[in-house]
Image: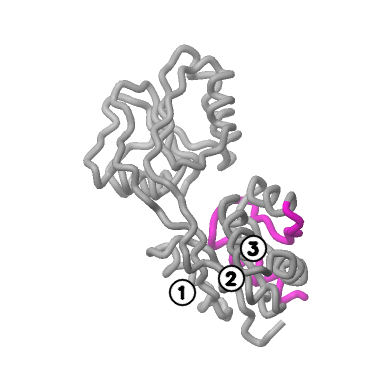
Amino acid sequence: MTASPRVAVFRPDDQRLEAAVELLESLGATPVADPMLAVEPAGSTPRSDADAVVFTSTTGVDLVADAGWTPGDATVCAIGETTAGALRDSGFEVDVVPETYTSAGLVEALEGEVEGARVELARSDHGSSVLVEGLFGAGAYVHETVLYRLVRPESAGESAELAAACDLDAALFTSSLTVEHFLEAAADRGVRGAATDGLNEAVVGAIGPPTARTAESNGIGVDVVPETADFELLARAVLERLQSN
């Protein structure tokens, strides 16, 4: 490990990336900012006749708030505390936040409450099927509105080349899609195999179990998964692991 470890961060190129870079620098790391996600708004809003509306990201919250959408009498559900905080900051009351910040956790929180109810999922085009299948299984009528699409920026891939050259000390994957886009960018640059090998010599952090499973199913060993799906906890845990190596 170098004196100031190189840590790849894949957040979208907005305030989330700026905050991630600032955090890593404050922890003594050299951030490699390589956004693997870009947001393309779909121009849609959730339906207005739902009994419950589920939000799974701060991006979705920001889009509906900017559009002037209101939930009416619907029960407002957030997949985790970060999304719940964004909802509250936008003036929405939050009724349900699961103890476990995952799709399965949200299904568990709602399954006894939604039989016969209309449940609206307001999220990206890459939403997990777990929510749909789980809520259908609980007896809900489920409708999904795609608020935005997540695409890979054309410039993505600097981190893959560094990993391939074994010049990356750590990587922070914040969704399954960041893993998939990293590997696609590596393949486009002709270094997928070498980049995977390089990551397996580095410390790899995944923000939650689904992201870890995606990485591991693609041959990337995961060293750190924080107990709570929170970027700061992920970054701190990875830096602690680096310092102990």
Element carrying mark 3: helix
Q: Earlier in the sequence, mark 3 or mark 1?
A: 1
> Is 242 drawn above or below residue 129 in the view shown?
below
Q: Is residue 95 visible?
A: no
Quarter in which the N terminus is drawn: bottom right
Element carrying mark 2: strand
Residue 145 position within the rendered picture, expressed as x and y whole percent measured from the top left: 39, 33
Q: Earlier in the sequence, mark 1 or mark 2?
A: 2
- Is 224 one of the magenta-colored residues? yes
Which numbered dot is residue 59? none
Relative depth, front residue between 2 and 43: 43
Specify the segment rendered in magenta.
Answer: 218-245
Circle 1: is it few (<14), some (14-19), or many (20+) Cα within 10 Å?
some
> For the residues marked 2 and 3, what is the alpha-carbon distance in whole angstroms?
17 Å
Q: Is residue 243 visible?
A: yes
**Amino acid type, label 3:** Ala
Residue at 57%, 40% in the rendered image: 102
Residue 9 position within the rendered picture, expressed as x and y whole percent measured from the top left: 55, 67
Circle 2: is it few (<14), some (14-19), or many (20+) Cα within 10 Å?
many
Report which quarter residue 47 is drawn in.
Answer: top left
Q: Which residue position holds label 3?
A: 187
Circle 3: is it few (<14), some (14-19), or many (20+) Cα within 10 Å?
some
Which one is in front in this view, the residue at disc 3 or the one at disc 1? 3
Quarter in which the C terminus is drawn: bottom right
Q: Which residue position holds label 2?
A: 8
Report which quarter residue 121 is drawn in.
Answer: top left
Relative depth, front residue between 221 and 40: 40
Element carrying mark 1: helix
Residue at 77%, 71% in the rendered image: 201
Q: Which residue position holds label 1?
A: 22
> Is 192 drawn above or below residue 141 in the view shown?
below
> Is 224 drawn above or below residue 23 in the view shown?
above
